[in-house]
Every structure is written in C-alpha cells, then in structure tokens.
Amino acid sequence: MPYTVDFVNVSTVGVESSPVPEALAGLRANEARYFKNKYDHVFTVSPAEDMPEVIDRVSRILSEEREIVISSRPLEASSFDVEGYHMAYVFYESGLSINVMYGIEDGAKRAVGFKLSDGMDIPEELATRFKFARQKSKLAGTIRGSYFVIKGEY
C-alpha cells in the first residue's frame, strides 16, 4: 500500500527495521519536501516487495554501469515522472537512498544519486568508488551524497 511521505510530521513508518530509522525517515522526508516545493509533486513510497520492477531497474543500472551490487535489503521504492524526467527511488535498510534521474528526451540528464542517512557508514560496495559530499538538512541532519552520470540506455 503506498505511503504519502509527510515532511512536516516525519514518521518512521516503513523504515523501522533500519538501524538508523529516524535519519532514514528524515532523508525520505527531505526528498518529499524537495519534490513538493520544486514540482508540486506529492512523494509516495511503497514497500519494496510491491515494486519489484523499480528495484530491478535500479539494480540493473547499477550493475551494468558500474558493476555495483547493493548488499542491503530494499525497504521502499518510488517511481514517478516529473517535468521530463522519470524518477526512481529505493530506500535501503542500511540507511542508503538511491535515486535514478532519467531524462525522457534524448540528450537529457541521466544520473544515479546516492545519499547516506546520518549515522550510517559508507557501504563497502561504494566506499572505494565515490567521494561523498556533506550537506545539512533540518529534516535529515547531515546527508552525505554522491552521484554518477548514466551512459547507457535504460
């Protein structure tokens, strides 16, 4: 069942099994606030088992582009179109959030973004491959993030 992410009253619903549930919920709420403020889009997530096609697509892009396999269990996913971009999000039990921004038009921006919840370690599969920049968020504390540009067609 889809869950509308509330960025005013942040809830850990759906991410309780994470070792950093409050930080992951704050990270998820930070994304919801961004899409509401920038695009007037209501950010919803569904349990990962209800969205296998999103999990598979994100996993395929990571594998084919960079030979990355995420070891953490996916908890939730989201998929939507906004202003010429197809967006996919996966929130993992470890506190990791991965988003795929895929421009629908030829030549549009296409990238994979990684965000680490406050208090989590950098996952082993990403630690040696990416540098993570820090940003402060009222909802999520300190977010560490990185990204790479998608070169293939998906």
Image (spheres, grey):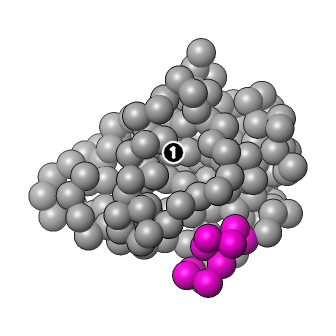
Q: Is residue 74 left or right of residue 143?
A: left
Quadrant housing the N terminus: top right
Q: Quadrant of residue 149?
A: bottom left
On screen, residue 142 above or below 128:
above
Q: Is residue 148 magenta?
A: no
On screen, residue 47 above or below 39:
above
In front of the other: 70 or 12? 70
Q: Quadrant of residue 13?
A: top right
Find the residue positioned furthest to the left: 106
In front of the other: 26 or 151? 151
Q: Amino acid at mark 1?
A: Tyr
- Would you call the spot at circle 1 few (<14 residues within 10 Å), some (14-19), or many (20 or more)? many
Q: Is residue 27 left or right of residue 46?
A: right
Q: Secondary structure at mark 1?
A: strand
Image coords of residue 35 (percent x, y) = 50, 43
Say which residue appears at 73% left-offset and 30% top-offset.
14
Q: Is residue 128 magenta?
A: yes
Image coords of residue 112 (percent x, y) = 44, 62
Q: Quadrant of residue 80?
A: top left
Disc count in the image?
1
Q: Which residue is mark 1?
A: 89
Image coords of residue 151 (percent x, y) = 26, 70
Is residue 8 visible in the rendered structure shown here?
no
Q: Is residue 93 left or right of residue 74?
A: right
Say which residue appears at 30% left-offset and 47% top-offset.
85
Say which residue appears at 42% left-offset and 72% top-offset.
66
Instruction: Please provide the residue range marked out in magenta.
Output: 122-130
Say which residue appears at 81% left-offset and 63% top-offset.
120
On screen, residue 31 above or below 96:
above
Is residue 17 visible in the rendered structure shown here?
yes
